[in-house]
Image: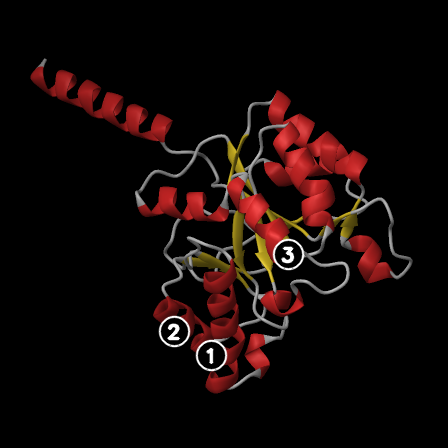
Amino acid sequence: MKTFAALALGWLAVTLIAATVPAGGTAVLMYHRIDGSVPADPVGRDLTVVPAAFEGELRWLHDHRVRTLTAAELTASLARGEPPRHAVVLTFDDGYEDAATVAFPLLRRYGARATFFVSSGFVGTPRHLSWRQMRAMMAGGMEIACHGTRHLDLSTLDRAGQLREIGHCVAAFRRYLPGWRPATYAYPAGKYDATTLSILESFGFRAAFTERPGLATSLTRRFELPRRRVRHDDALAQFETLATP
């Protein structure tokens, strides 16, 4: 009887533990532009999601009660050993102006949050975000994060070049975004090397994101976290697959 009771308790404990562990991990979705004006070139077209499609994706997340986290919130949750359940991370690369004029209003409409990876060297230039817009987005609950200074391939730079590319972004954000601190980073074109990882560590970043497909399950390789790309031609059914572990 004692043996049976011990086995029963053991199986109960395993069942309870399994029930608390999310299956698969968390999807980190990568966007670039949300714009009704779609470029004719294949690359620009692929990177541009029209507003109606993006709103449909936000509506699906809202209706299915999928929480939206920032990349920093995901990192903090994983660091606590508490992988988020029924959640997704929305990220936007490069810092195009439509992030503030189109994406941000739609995110607020659906009570969603997101991370915007911005290349600081393009802030204030035509078709890109301004510091004022970025401050407003931060005040609205969005995360503004580093995407380098000039969107350079870090793997082609020596250590001094990488220090400039990452360090200038950090310095600019600290200067123009009150209260900003290094948290997450996204590699332009997903490119980096071993030197990059040590530099990010020295600046105090907690995690960084690649363009490798996959799900975020832990911080074992915290500077090489995966993302799933959302494309122009993705139908809602494809988005559902991307957003689901």
- Label number found at residue 93: 3
- The residue wearing badge 2 is 198
* Residue lying at the far top of the rendered structure: 1
* Residue 30 position in % (x across, y down): 63, 50
The amino acid on which the numbered mark 2 sits, given as a three-letter code, is Ser
Q: Distance between the residues labelled 2 and 3?
A: 22 Å
70 with respect to 127 (left or right): left
Q: Name which residue lies at 15% across and 17% down.
A: 4
* Residue 160 position in % (x across, y down): 47, 86
The answer to which quarter of the image holds residue 243 is top right
Q: How far apart are marks 3 and 1 (CA)?
A: 20 Å
2 or 1: mark nearer the eye = 1
* Residue 26 position in % (x across, y down): 50, 41
Q: Name which residue lies at 36% across and 26% down.
A: 19
Depth order, front residue of 32/178: 178
**Position above or below: 118 against 113:** below
- The residue wearing badge 1 is 163
98 with respect to 38 (left or right): left
The amino acid on which the numbered mark 3 sits, given as a three-letter code, is Asp
Depth order, front residue of 94/238: 94
